Image (cartoon, rainbow, N blue to C red):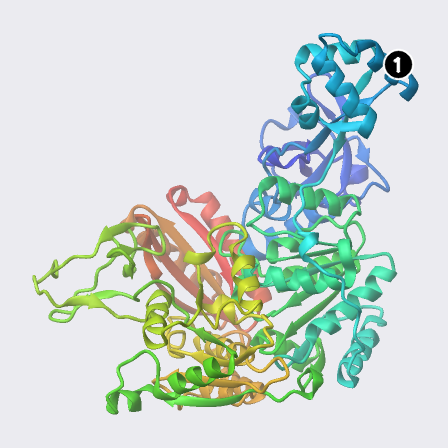
Amino acid sequence: MIYADIIVDISHEKLDRSFQYAVPEKLAKQLHVGMVVSIPFGKGNHVRKGYVIALTDKATFEPSRIKEIEGICAGEETTESRLIALAAWMREVYGSTMIQALKTVLPIREKVKEKEIRRVCLAMEEEQAKALLKEWEGSRYKARIRLLKGLLAEKSLEYKEAVQLGMSAAVKDYFLEQGIARIKSDLVYRSAVHADEMTRQPSLPLTPEQQQAVEIIEKEWSREFPRPVLLHGVTGSGKTRVYMEMIERVLKAGQQAIVLIPEIALTYQTVQRFYGRFGDKVSVINSRLSAGERYDQMRRARNGEVQVMVGPRSALFTPFSNLGLIVIDEEHESTYKSETSPRYHARETAVERARMEGARVLLGSATPSLEAYCRAQNGAYALAELKGRYGERALPEVSVVDLREELKAGNRSILSRSLKEAIEERLSRGEQTMLFLNRRGYAGFVSCRSCGHVMKCPHCDVSLSEHRGGRLICHYCGYQEPKPKSCPACGSPYIGGFQAGTQQIEQVLLREFPGVRVLRMDYDTTRNKGSYEKILAAFGAHEADILVGTQMIVKGHDFPKVTLVGVLAADLSLNGSDYRSAERTFQLLTQAVGRAGRGTRSGQAIIQTYHPEHYSIAAAASQDYKAFYQEEMGYRELLSYPPAAGMLAVLGSCGEEELLRRAMHYLKLFAEKISRGKPLTIIGPAPAAVGKVRDIYRQVLYLKYENTETLIQIKDKLEQYIEVNSGFRKIQIQFDFN
C-alpha cells in the first residue's frame, strides 16, 4: 500500500502539520509530489483540497484508520504545487526534512496583516450636502461643519484627516446613520522600491560583442531542451546589459524573470538599473525588508503585478506563475550556498526549477566558479564570452606590492608607500578610491607577545576581535568582554591586537590625510535598514573621497569616479581551511581590481601581499581567468576535489562532546561498510573549522567519490541508518555536497 503525506492548508504558518492518506490503487501510478488532491477531512469528512508532499509505503498509525484520497484535481496545478515539487527535490538531493525544505521554498511563514487605507467618502449628492451645511451654519455642530466642508472640498478624506477635522465616534456614527458619508477600505501594498529615487533610462544599443553574446543565448534557447548559459565577461564588460536584453524578450512573451544577486549590498544599484529599464514591473525582496513588505512583494508576484523580482538566493522561490528566465549574477559567490538545512546551492536549484517550469537559466560572472566553467567546457552549459570592457575602456593597470620588502624598508604602516602616493594623487585630482580588506572590526585578534596566548570566546572555538571602546567581541555568538590590561595566562603587560580591520584603516586614513572624507562599509555599519543604500548613494554622489570596506564593496558596484582600488591584505583569504581558498582569493582580487576605471578615466589597482608569487594573486593581477582555471584544476584533479570529483560533508553537532565523537565514528564505520568495492575516500571525523559554537560541539566527516550521484545514494543510506539508531536522537546531522 502507498501512503501520501498531505498538507491541507498552504498558509505558511501551518506547514509543520501534515496528514497521511492512503492512495487508492487506481491513482497509484498517476500520483506524484506537488499534486493537488481532494480528500475527506475532519470528523464530518468535508471534501477539501490538499498538496501531496511525500509518498511512502510506511503507515504512521493503524492502516485501518487511514482515510483514502478521493481524487486528483485535474488541471489545478498551482505555483505552490510546483514549489512543493521543488522542495521534494531539494530534500532528496541535499538531505533535510520535508518540512525544512518547504519552509525554504515557501518562506513567508508568519501571519501578516494586509495593509489597508480607510477613507471617509461623501455618500449624498453634492447639492444635498451643501443644503445641509447651510442648515448647520451658526449652530453648535462645529465638528460636523468642518467634516462636511472637508468632504465637499475633497469628496473623500483619509481616515486620519477626518479625525483631525473633528470626526469623533459620535460624529462618525451620525454621518453613517444619516447617509451623509460612508467608510471605504482599500488594500495597498507596502512598497519595497522607492520609485521616487529611481529614474527611467533609455535602453542603450548593444556593442557588437554584446550582440554576439545575445545571439549565442538565443540560439541555445531555440533548442528543444536549452542548456543553462554561462556568460563569462571581464569586469565592466556590460553583462547587465545582456541580462536586460534577454529579460526584455522574456517579458514580451508574457513571462516573468528572477534576477539573483549575491549580496543585499548590491540591491540598491541593481534595482536602479533594472527599474530604469523596466519601471514598476520590477520589485525586490531581501531579508532587510519588514515581514509585511516581503509578504506584499510575494503577493504582487503571485497576482502577476510584477514581472521582474530582484534579490539574493531566497528570491529564487518567488511564486511566479509563468516563469521564463532565472538570471544568476556573480554566480561564483559563496553566498548562493545556504548554511542551514537544506544546504542547497542556488545555481543547481535554479537549474532544477527552470527544468520543472520550462524556463531558462543565464549565469554571469567575470570569475566563474570552477564548477560552472568546467560544465561549460564539457558541454553541460553553453558558453558566451565578453572579452572587452564596455566602450572599449582599458582594464586597470595592476601592480603587486610585496609587504615583506615594505617591512625591510622600515614601513610598518597598513598602507604601502606606493598605495599612499596613489591615494594622495587621487585626492589632488578629485577622484575616488576604494580600499578593500576582508576583515571587519578594529583588529583581527588579541594575543600576548610574551607567551602567545590568544584571547578566545569561551563558547566558540574562535578568537575574539578588538573593537572600539576596548571591547572584545565574538563574531559567531556575540559574546563580549573588556580587553584585559595584562595577559590572563602569564601576566605580561605586552598584550595587543593584530591591527588589520576596517575601523583601524579608517583611523589611519584620517590621520595620514587630514580633511579626507571616509566612508566605511562593513557588517557593523550596515546593520540598520536602508544603511546600504545610504552609504552607496553618498559615495556615488561623491560625498566621500575614500570607501573602506569588506568584500561587500567589491561585488558588482559601478562608480565612474573610482580610479584607484587598493587591496590591503590579499593573503587573508588565501590561508583559510578550505580547498577553495585559492579560488576565492582569485575571485575577490579580480572583482576588487575590476571596480577601478569603470568611467571615462583610466584605473589603477594596487594589491598588497606577503605572497606575490602565488598563482591566484599573479593571475588576478593579470586578469587571466583561464591561466588560473588550468592551474587550479590541476590541483583539484590531483587531490580529487570538486569539480574533479564529488564530495559529501556529513556535519554532526551535539552538546555532549563524547557522544558526538562516538556517533561520528559509527557513521564512518557504516560508510566504510556500504562502500565496499567502491573507490570511496573517507576523511575524518574531525572537529569542524569552528569546533564549538554556543557550547555546541561540531564534527565533520568527508566522503569523496568520482561522481555525486553515488554520494547521494550513500547519503540516503546514512539517513536511514541515523533514523533507526536511537543513539543519534541527541545529535543533529546535516549533509553538505561539494
| In this view, 405 is above or below 668 | below
Choose top left, top right, bottom left or bottom right for residue 240. Answer: bottom right
Examine the rendering and report whether any part of residue 458 can be seen: no
Quadrant assignment, res 496? bottom left
Residue 297 at x, y = what percent?
69, 46
Q: Is residue 114 above or below residue 322?
A: above
On screen, residue 376 above or below 648: below
- Relative side of 431 to 178, left or right: left
Look at the image and tell me whether residue 706 can be seen.
yes
Q: Is residue 616 left or right of residue 210?
A: left
Q: Quadrant of the N terminus?
A: top right
- Residue sitting at x 39%, y 88%: 418
Kind of element beneath mark 1: helix
Count residues near mark 1 (Cα–Cα under 10 Å), then give few for <14, some for 14-19, many for 20+.
few
Label total for image: 1
Residue 631: percent from left, percent from top: 50, 88
Q: Amino acid at mark 1?
A: Ala
Q: Residue extending furthest left?
A: 491
| Residue name at image x 67 percent, y 45 percent | 191
Q: Is residue 70 left or right of residue 636?
A: right
Q: Residue at x 57, y 65 (%)?
A: 710
Q: Which of 573/638 is in front?
A: 573
The residue indicated by pointer 1 is 131
Q: Nearer the viewer, residue 518 or 419?
A: 518
Q: Residue furthest front?
A: 138
Query: Where residue 529 appears, x then y in whole percent?
Result: 52, 50
Residue drawn 37% across the image and 42% down it: 730
Residue 129 x, y percent position in the rendering: 86, 17
